[in-house]
Amino acid sequence: MNDQGASTGREGRVRVVGTAHVSSESVREVEDTIEDERPDVVAVELDEGRYRQLQGETPDDIEPGDLLRGNTVFQFLAYWMLSYVQSRLGEKFDVTPGADMMAAVDSAEELGIDVALVDRDIQTTIQRFWARLGPIEKARLVGGLVFGVTDARGIGLALGVAAGVIAGPLLGLFGPSLGLTLPILTRITGGVLLAIAVGLVVHTLADVVLGPDEALIAGGAVGVAAGLLGGVGLGLADGVVASLGPFVARVVGSLALGLAGGVSVGLVAGWLADRAGYGAAEADELDDFDVAELTDADVVSVMMEEFRTFSPAGARALIDERDAYIAHELVRLREAGRDVVAVVGAGHREGIEGYLDAPETLPPWESLVGTDSGGGVPWLKAVGVLVSVGFVAFFVLLAMAGVRDGFLLRLFAAWFVVNGVFAAGLARLAGARWSSTLVGGLVAWMTSVNPLLAPGWFTGYVELRHNPVNVADIGTLNELLSDEEKPIRQLVGEMFEVPLFKLIMVVAMTNVGSMIASLLFAVYVLPLFATEIGGIEGVSRLMVEGARNSAELLWRTVT
């Protein structure tokens, strides 16, 4: 790119060409306009990174330290979502996304015309966009991407499992008041054990004569039937469960009941949503798109205009701020006396031209650059501080009440082990290296105490040191998602071979494991330890006593 800042002593002029990033008509319009106008500068809606990517250069790897900023993975999810929609449209209309911008660059270079990259850095834009989305808006954005991998039934199943994991411990905590006595939980636990044993045997035998999917279905169906009839109905495994102790019956029984209810509700809800066509809207919208209409609105801007209805702040970061940023650059070129043809997405044209007509309305440059905290009350930080203080206070108050050090050490060891096993186990299940798995397991206890930290960040940090990822992985994922005929099982397997997707899943699964462990510890393990000091009532009494002793010690110290 050449220097466009030198002044010519006169004020130049700017012509804005609005294009659709996936329209072949736009490519021809750009080439014809530059040929006719012969400006001093061709300005394009690109930043340095996207320009190099369109030129075929390899994008920069993600620095390992960037992962510890916390939102890097989620910002890549947002970027992936935008890229996926644009690539789908480009595939439908047989035009490479960004072809209009590269046509402008190529035409300018052929005619010896300077080229200016006038868009804000994409990472800054995505960071500011993500920071301004609310929790529900973020879930809707990521959910839109998930529908590219599976359908409403698959999502219903996943949400059902998540709900079951939460419901199970709650049933274990409040079950007795709901009539879930130990004998009932013993029957359910026996059914689970019998279902697993029979299912494994049937799957092993069926795998000899059936395919992998059919053997899995056969093993699952026969196992569930055996568990319900033989275990829950006839109590054939009650003796085995009794030998394991009431704690096992309480944990396994309540978790199984919660998962059964969650999965059942999730499957029914997913089936109803699938019948209603939820999740198929994107494909229908692409089929109904008229390529002629694309010249009236930039693809990304069209999608984000819909986001204005539920996230005006997010739309401002992705559209309005970029209008102002690009207009600042074009005003600078115009004041330097350069005649400019600016090639931008049509969705930006109106906003940019408004600023060019009235440059005094431009927001300050400083307000358009740098990171954004998103504003509002930092509820997450407040909750994180309260959880951390509560965890420390729990141990301090018990110690001040005279509880034996050995008891506190065993309680802390249980916290450490439970968090480590679940975080490391799910990280490994997602494909993490053994070194990454070990790191995630070792820090899980600490990150559970402070929700502002997450074991997945540390697991991901180690993963990145051995397996770098870059923006090009998003293109690979988009190609995989475009194959609508490929079975989901095979699709997911191939997606796990893409470094970026594997990183996202390792980070997410490590964090999920730690959250599940914290919930299970509070509901199952802590009450078990509490029986040594008088149960829950005894713990409460000791904490009050510890608070009283702490206050007396503080008073004596002050006076």
Image (tube, rainbow, N blue to C red):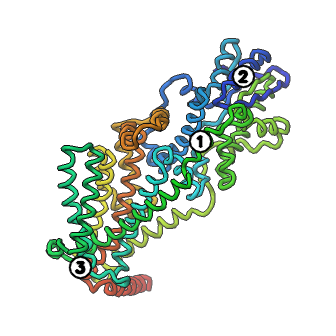
Left or right, residue 194 beside residue 178 = left
- Do residues under tags 2 and 3 come within 8 Å of each other at their CB atoms? no
When asked about the image quadrant of residue 318, the answer is top right
Residue wearing tag 2? 30
Q: Secondary structure at mark 1?
A: helix
Where residue 78 sits in the image (x, y, percent)?
A: 54, 45
Mark 1 — residue?
Answer: 124
Proximity of marks 1 and 3: CB atoms separated by less than 8 Å: no
Checking the image for residue 404, the label placed there is 3
- Element under disc 3: loop
Residue 82 in sight here:
yes
Mark 2 Cα shell of 10 Å, populated few (<14), some (14-19), many (≥20): many
Q: Amino acid at mark 2?
A: Val
- Quadrant containing the N terminus is top right
Q: Quadrant of the C terminus?
A: bottom left
The CA distance from mark 2 to mark 3 is: 78 Å
